Image: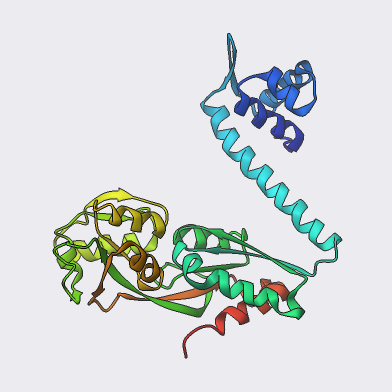
Amino acid sequence: MRDLDLTTLRLYVSVCETGNIARAGDRASIVGSAISKRLAQLEEQVGTPLLVRKRHGVLPTAAGQTLLEHARGMLDGAARIERDMQTYAAGGHGQVRILASVSAMTESLADDVAAFLKQPAHRSIHVDLEERVSPEIVRGVREGLASLGVCWDAAELGALQARPYRSDQLCVVVPPGHALAGRKAVRFEDTLDYEHVSLPVNSAVQVMLQRQAAQVGRTLRHRVVVTNFEAALRVVRAGLAISLVPREVAQDPAAAYGLKLVALREPWAERRFIICYRDRQSLSPAALLLLEHLAAQAPT
């Protein structure tokens, strides 16, 4: 297969998003016939139909939907390359991309990165932060999508190297009046009698909680699955479920919402975070500086 043309892919994505070649042409200031010609060449290049022509527009085929997903990824990568190069052209001295778990982002990472960037010696360094679940963080760092990853140390790192970062303490958040609200501390097994609001099932903490429940012959019942801790606390506030979240995240919102924090009496309730990377030799000078700054925040 010849190299795919980014301009054609960009037009293809626009056609799929608008569902109409003419509207995609208006968006790109190109006549529809020119787009149709490019799409025909693209279908010939990949060797399979990509679009189904309907009376009032077009729809991607199964192959077309797959290409659409890949095309969006390629265009996003090209945009990142352009942005990074513009940084250097404008006199920037470094670009560092970090993938981080929701816990790390919510608790301290953003503040630690901000403190790093405020130092005069680092003013020409740019840092991109992107939230991912732990398996995606490890995969992204391994595949070179990011220089650094910040995740829970329970993640399977494979050949990646790691440095300690911060830690947090999981606790149980319950609405006032809940059966557990009057307890100072509970075992995880005590929470399994109640429905939970949880983070995505492939996140490291949810995988661990499912495993812990299985070890005592129980299951973790999900009533609601959310993508961030703020949403989890709102669900608890509504009285729909309880949740296990880091005390560092829950303390202020719990006080504002009138929620109760109950200590979790388990050896794994204290979570340690790490900074993972492929190897020091592959890190840019800017990434090395940021790695050392973040590692310095680890408790002694």
Q: Residue furthest top?
A: 55
Which of the pair 285/249 is nearer the observer?
249
| Residue at image location 34% in from the left, 66% down from the top | 254
Q: Which quarter of the figure has residue 16?
A: top right
Position of residue 79 in the picture relative to residue 92 (left or right): left
Can you say whether 185 is above or below 6 in the image? Answer: below
| Residue at image location 54% in from the left, 75% down from the top | 161
Q: Which quarter of the figure has residue 168?
A: bottom left
Which of the pair 136/87 is nearer the observer?
87
Position of residue 299 in the picture relative to residue 201 (left or right): right
Position of residue 291 in the picture relative to residue 214 (left or right): right
Residue 97 is situated, as x and y percent measured from the top left of the image, at 64, 63
Image quadrant occupied by the N terminus: top right
Q: Which quarter of the figure has residue 177?
A: bottom left
Which of the pair 199/61 is nearer the observer?
199
Q: How many labels does the image show?
A: 0
Position of residue 37 in the picture relative to residue 100 (left or right): right
| Residue at image location 73% in from the left, 31% down from the top | 8
| Residue at image location 76% in from the left, 79% down from the top | 120
Residue 34 is situated, as x and y percent measured from the top left of the image, at 79, 20
Does any portion of residue 155 appear in the rendered image?
A: yes
Does any portion of residue 199 appear in the rendered image?
A: no
Residue 51 is situated, as x and y percent measured from the top left of the image, at 60, 21
Q: Which residue lies furthest to the bottom in this view?
A: 300
Residue 78 is situated, as x and y percent measured from the top left of the image, at 72, 47
Q: How is the image coloured?
A: rainbow
